[in-house]
């Protein structure tokens, strides 16, 4: 049986096949050859490899956290009045279905239209409060204060015409709540939250254990919401490659264009890791769909080797 170290190396070699995201200029400055992996199990045992000290921005991975937090605070029933739970098969920033469907309700919270809508539902009197509440929620899970990458945030704000179009369209259909520019500001800020693979894997572990951190026994969200979030990750989390990812990897996962992937797994002995497992990978070279080339490769290889697929 090949070691995890071997798969990290093999996957990193394939990073040359991808490119850093260029539509957000600050992300294009990342070193495309980087690769980092963290797996953490329910007893706190960790596997760490690669450039693990590098911070990266959550980008679309923040959609899982904002969705969970909105459901926790506002109830799942309320949130589902504004966003559906169906995959689209379209790119993450597609606008087409907002016009084609009745009421213009976004298909799911893992695409931009859905996530921007979710951001508009977050509790708080103004943009600062809304963002702070979300940061507090996430900060408790990772055990440290959350901060954003100012350069990435500003870079995205300047180049966000597409997201602005989506948001104004949602507003015209009475789906997006509140002031469009404030909502977008909170959305860009949560996309620009910085993490390391270690902190991201901890969130994966909490998801794997249905909302409870198995190391501290602290509950952050309900089992019901955890199940919905994982179902959405599996069906919609890897953009319009979610079907292939479910077929060939079979782990609830969410990627971001910065090159991060958050995954949830379970195993009786994954190179010494046992029980519920959170996985985070970071490799900024992404494929045309927006998923990290090295990250996908690593998850595919270990899923086959250790039979990790939930199916
Ligand atoms: N797929 C992504 O990671 C997209 C996130 C990015 N901030 C955007 O809204 O375009």
Image (cartoon, rainbow, N blue to C red):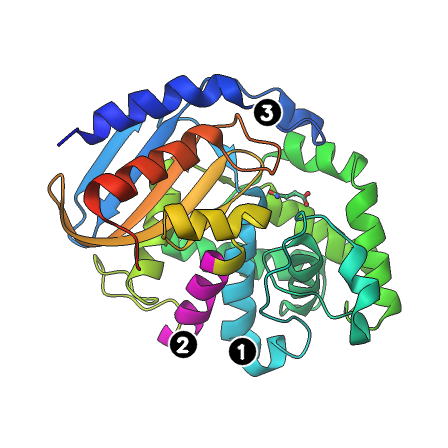
Disc on the earlier residue, 1 or 3: 3
Respond yes or no on whether mark 3 lies under 8 Å from ligand 1: no
Q: Position of residue 124 (x, y in %)?
A: 65, 68
Look at the numbered disc 2 and give the secondary structure of its residue: helix
Provide the residue span drawn in magenta. 223-234
User: How many C-alpha atoms fall within 10 Å of the one at disc 1: few (<14), some, or many (≥20)?
Assistant: some
Judge whether residue 143 can be spotted in this image: no
**Which one is in front in this view, the residue at disc 1 or the one at disc 3?**
3
Could you tell me which residue is drawn at 59 percent across and 25 percent down?
A: 20
* Residue 11: numbered disc: none
- The front one of 245 and 292 is 245
State how far apart marks 2 and 3 are (Cα): 36 Å
Look at the numbered disc 1 and give the secondary structure of its residue: helix
| Tag 3 residue | 20
Look at the numbered disc 3 and give the secondary structure of its residue: loop
Disc on the earlier residue, 2 or 3: 3
Main secondary structure along the magenta-highlighted residues: helix
Q: Is residue 279 left or right of residue 83?
A: left
- How many labels sit on residues? 3
Q: Is residue 130 above or below residue 190?
A: below
Quadrant of picture, ligand 1: top right
The image quadrant of residue 303 is top left
* Residue 224: numbered disc: 2
Q: Quadrant of the C terminus?
A: bottom left
State how far apart marks 2 and 1 are (Cα): 9 Å
| Tag 1 residue | 76
Labels 2 & 1 near each other (Cβ < 8 A): yes
Q: Is residue 86 above or below residue 288?
A: below
Could you tell me which residue is drawn at 65 percent across and 70 percent down?
A: 83
């Amino acid at each position: 049986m090949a070691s995890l170290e071997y798969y990290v190396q093999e996957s990193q070699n394939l990073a040359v096949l991808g490119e850093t995201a260029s539509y957000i200029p600050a992300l294009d400055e990342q070193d495309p050859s980087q690769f980092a992996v963290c797996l953490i199990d329910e007893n706190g045992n960790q596997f760490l490899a690669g450039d693990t000290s590098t911070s990266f921005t959550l980008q679309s991975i923040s959609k899982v956290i904002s969705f969970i937090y909105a459901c926790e605070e506002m109830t799942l029933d309320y949130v589902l009045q504004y966003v559906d739970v169906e995959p689209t098969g379209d790119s993450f920033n597609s606008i087409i279905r907002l016009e084609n469907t009745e009421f213009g309700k976004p298909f799911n919270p893992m695409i931009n239209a859905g996530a921007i809508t979710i951001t508009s539902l977050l509790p708080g009197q103004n943009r600062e409060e809304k963002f702070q509440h979300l940061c507090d929620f996430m900060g408790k899970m990772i055990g440290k204060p959350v901060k954003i990458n100012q350069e990435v945030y500003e870079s995205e704000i300047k180049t966000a015409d597409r997201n602005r179009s989506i948001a104004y369209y949602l507003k015209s259909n009475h789906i997006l709540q509140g002031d469009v520019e404030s909502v977008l500001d909170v959305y860009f800020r949560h996309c620009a939250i910085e993490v390391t693979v270690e902190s991201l894997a901890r969130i994966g572990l909490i998801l794997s254990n249905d909302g409870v951190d198995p190391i501290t026994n602290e509950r952050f969200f309900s089992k019901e919401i955890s199940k919905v979030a994982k179902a959405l990750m599996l069906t919609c989390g890897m953009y319009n490659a979610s079907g292939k990812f479910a077929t060939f990897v079979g782990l609830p996962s969410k990627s971001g264009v910065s090159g991060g992937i958050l995954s949830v797994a379970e195993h009786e002995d994954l190179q010494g890791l046992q029980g519920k497992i959170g996985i985070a990978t970071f490799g900024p070279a992404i494929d045309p769909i927006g998923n990290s080339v090295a990250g996908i490769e690593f998850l595919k290889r270990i899923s086959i080797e250790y039979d990790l697929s939930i199916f």
